[in-house]
Image (tube, rainbow, N blue to C red):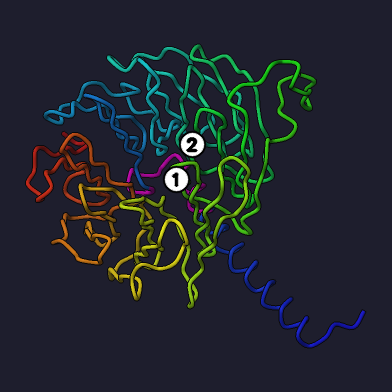
Amino acid sequence: MILSHRRKKKLGEKMKKNITIAALLILIISAMLAGCTGNVGTSSSWPGFSVDNDLAVVSYGYQLYALNVQNGSKTWVFPAEQNSKIIFYAPVEFAENLVIAGDYTKNLYALNSSNGILQWQFDGAESRYVASAFYKNGYIYAPNADQKLYVLDQNGVLQWIFETAGANWSKPVADEQYLYLASMDHNIYALNLTYASSDLVAGKDGTRNRVEEPVWKTDLGTAVVSDPLLADGFLYAGTIDGKMFKVSASTGEIVWKFEGEAKIKSIWTKPVILDNVVFFATEDGSIYALNAETGAPVWDAPMPTGSQIVAGGVVINDTVGFGTLGGNLVIVDKDQVTSPSLSREGAVYSTPVYKDGKLYLVMVNGEKLVYALDENGREYWTFSTEE
């Protein structure tokens, strides 16, 4: 078959794009695999961080560190002694009186939130937990890199499994009707929150516990590695080829797609919304602001930060902040007016958290691991794993 010059050019551009993305994923996966070797130190990957009421939990290296949010003191550590075969980086999820944590050796743990004592352990996955699990109405939805979503009850009993065509590195979100899962197979899926046994089909092992078809799925063209945002009946998700999508949560219809006039770098960050403006950052350190209704840029040009950004944004009163690998929290409002950056030694890989007047920054390769600050950067307390 003879191809036209234009078609050959388009095919070449598509192949080049796919090769670039494949190479990026190979580098990512190689780094993740390297992070699972027995001699790795805690600086080999970025930590997970979660806050709920009076407890903050850092997932970093061989242990989980539960901290009192008032003073940063350790409430408990799991496991009590380091085990080089157990490595944590996925943020934990809080489920009533449980802390749900996945490790890089296919285990999902449920710990008593008060004392860190193991309540149950699920070892049915075949790969690592890169993303946090999600909890809603008594069920735990745990995405895994083995291309499956595992759904368990609060006692750790497997309820059902949904299989995708790619690894799952994003935390699901849900409303009162559906659960939404973004996958590295390019799709966002909508699933029912629960399924009757009669709705399930048999898997390869003959067990009737598989969801055969999603309610809907939408192909975004490239892998999604960041957590999607669910707001006012719509999903906002960025892809590693630099596109931001708004998708109807009820139908899966793409409302708008933003890719900019110039090529946008990979999007690793979960977007945030403030005053009907969608903010997100790209891995080259550019911050974008889009009209949530139309997807049109709010600013004349994206805001450069001078350093890479891989962590999601955080809303701080009337501003948003993005942490950089240069150690700065860059703060800006919808009019592109900046506030003084908050700086600490190290790099920000984890999404900052602002809760109850405290701003939590997690720094890798710095003097301290966790900083609890006020809006002006004054320290309430700090935490290091060596303390």
Residue 173, how many percent across, how many down?
Answer: 49, 36
Dominant secondary structure (helix, strand or loop) of the stretch shown in magenta:
loop
Compared with 127, 139 (above or below) is: above
- State the residue position of label 2: 173
**Disc ID at residue 144:** none
Q: Position of residue 363 (x, y in %)?
A: 24, 49
The picture places residue 90, in percent across and down from the top left corner, at 42, 37
Identify residue type, mark 1: Leu
Residue under pointer 1: 229
On the rendered structure, is 89 left or right of 222?
Answer: left
**Of the pair 127 and 290, the residue shown nearer to us:** 290
Q: Nearer the viewer, residue 324 or 230?
A: 230
Label 2: element kind: strand
Going by the numbered disc 2, the residue's amino acid type is Val
- Residue 307: x, y in percent? 30, 67
Neighbor class of circle 1 (other Cα within 10 Å; few <14, some 14-19, many 20+) is: many
Magenta stretch bounds: 30-45
Report how far apart the C-alphas of labels 2 and 1 lie in the structure.
Answer: 8 Å
Crowd class of label 2 (few under 14; some 14 to 19; many from 20; radius 10 Å): many
Q: Quadrant of the C terminus?
A: top left
Outermost residue toward the bottom in this view: 5
Q: Is residue 39 magenta?
A: yes
Residue at 67% over, 77% down: 13
Residue at 83 percent across and 86 percent down: it is: 4
Q: Are marks 2 and 1 in contact (CB under 8 Å)?
A: yes
Report the quarter where the N terminus lies. bottom right
* Residue that extends furthest to the right in the rendered view of this protein: 1
Q: Is residue 365 above or below residue 298?
A: above
Q: Nearer the viewer, residue 90 or 40?
A: 90
114 over 299 or under it: above or below: above
Name which of mark 2 and mark 1 comes first in the sequence: 2
Mark 1, secondary structure of its residue? strand
